[in-house]
Image (cartoon, rainbow, N blue to C red):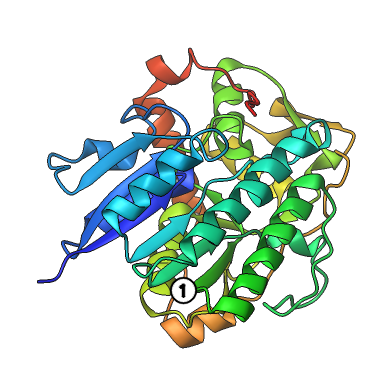
């Protein structure tokens, strides 16, 4: 059996670690993870609960500061496949430090791709894009929709996508894109709305609903997204964009209400409405017909089941989780 080397950039992220875990289920793959921070604990890294990690290695390297070491590692290992989750991804602080978002999401990417396009080992490069590049989604938003970003974060991701389009067009760079909607699941960053709401309720704190929680999101379980990403990496058409999304959107307010019910509370008991954040798009609802029809992919984990899973994960790790910060801590 031929074994392929896959490099996952951003392997220490919530989405990256889940794909690493899924790839390690497949004996055809040897996986190398790269992220800027030290490897986290098994509370947040699903793959670290495995008994055998002989097909995985991890390197703490920063795209902005350690690019020569990253390129040397890639040239030494000669991966046939690369998946890039590495990005500054939070929306609100991108207004304060837009240059950091562009440095990581666009400038560092340019240096990486310009090197990789000259190498003969890379067969497929899967880039993790974002539906936020579309701005507020009106009607059926397909992969050919015109970008209309509303925040510096979204603009930096749109710029990255355009850069990759240029390299594909001019040099045949083997890029594929995936744009998944709002991922969630056990192990997610604690400042995200779903785990944070559960923690706040357990601590007796009030949840603030920006804009009354009326923004519509498309919540999709992280394992459904990872299964889609693996299918795109293996069988997607090079040069194509693929959407991964659930069957329908749901207002943030309704999601928090479901969490309240799971914990035996009511929405009025646990929340208060506050002003909306700058650049908040009214809806992220995108069409994922291409992935469903070409790859046979579809989401399988209902929201109610996924929310209960996050509650169980927080309960099981409460003594650790209760001591951790619940706000985003920016690092350039």
Report the side of 152 relative to 25 (left or right): right
Q: Could you tell me residue 129's position as x and y percent?
A: 61, 60
Mark 1, other Cα within 10 Å: few <14 / some 14–19 / many ≥20: some
Quadrant assignment for the C terminus = top right
Disc tally is 1
Q: Could you tell me residue 21's position as x and y percent?
A: 30, 50
Q: Could you tell me residue 65's position as x and y percent?
A: 54, 33
Furthest residue in direction left, as rendered: 1
* Residue 12 is at least partly visible in this image: no
Element under disc 1: loop
Q: Could you tell me residue 291's position as x and y percent?
A: 51, 79
* Residue 256 is at least partly visible in this image: yes
Residue at (58% x, 62% y) in the render: 180
Report the side of 150 relative to 160 (left or right): right
Report the side of 116 relative to 171 (left or right): left
- The part of the image, by quadrant, that contains residue 61 is top left
Give above or below for 22 relative to 314.
below
Give above or below for 83 relative to 241.
above
Of 241 and 194, the residue lying toward us: 241
Of 242 and 203, the residue lying toward us: 242
Residue at (68% x, 64% y) in the render: 163
């Amino acid at each position: 059996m031929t074994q392929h080397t896959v490099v996952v950039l951003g392997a220490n992220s919530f989405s990256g670690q889940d794909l690493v875990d899924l790839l390690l289920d497949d004996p055809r793959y040897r996986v190398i993870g790269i992220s800027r921070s030290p490897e986290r604990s098994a509370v947040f890294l699903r793959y670290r609960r495995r008994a055998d990690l002989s097909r995985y290695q991890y390197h703490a390297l920063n795209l902005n500061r350690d690019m020569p070491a990253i390129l040397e590692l890639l040239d030494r290992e000669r991966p046939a496949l690369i998946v890039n989750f590495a990005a500054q991804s939070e929306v609100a602080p991108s207004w304060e430090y837009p240059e950091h978002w562009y440095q990581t999401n666009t400038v560092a990417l340019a240096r990486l791709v310009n090197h990789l396009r000259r190498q003969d080992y890379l067969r497929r490069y899967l880039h993790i894009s974002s539906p936020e590049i579309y701005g507020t989604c009106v009607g059926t938003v397909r992969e050919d929709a015109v970008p209309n970003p509303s925040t510096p974060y979204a603009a930096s991701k749109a710029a990255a996508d355009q850069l990759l389009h240029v390299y594909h067009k001019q040099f045949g760079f083997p890029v594929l894109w995936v744009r998944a909607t709002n991922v969630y699941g056990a192990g997610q960053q604690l400042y995200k709305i779903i785990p944070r709401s559960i923690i706040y309720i357990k601590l007796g704190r009030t949840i603030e609903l920006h804009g009354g929680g009326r923004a519509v999101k498309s919540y999709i379980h992280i394992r459904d997204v990872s299964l889609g990403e693996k299918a795109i990496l293996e069988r997607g058409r090079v040069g194509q964009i693929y959407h991964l999304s659930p069957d329908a959107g749901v207002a943030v307010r309704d999601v928090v209400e479901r969490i309240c019910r799971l914990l035996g509370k009511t929405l009025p008991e646990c929340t208060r409405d506050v002003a909306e954040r700058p650049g908040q798009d009214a809806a992220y609802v995108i069409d994922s017909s291409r992935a469903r029809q070409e790859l046979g992919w579809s989401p399988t984990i209902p929201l109610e089941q996924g929310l209960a899973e996050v509650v169980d994960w927080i309960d099981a790790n409460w003594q650790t989780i209760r001591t951790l910060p619940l706000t985003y801590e920016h690092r350039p």
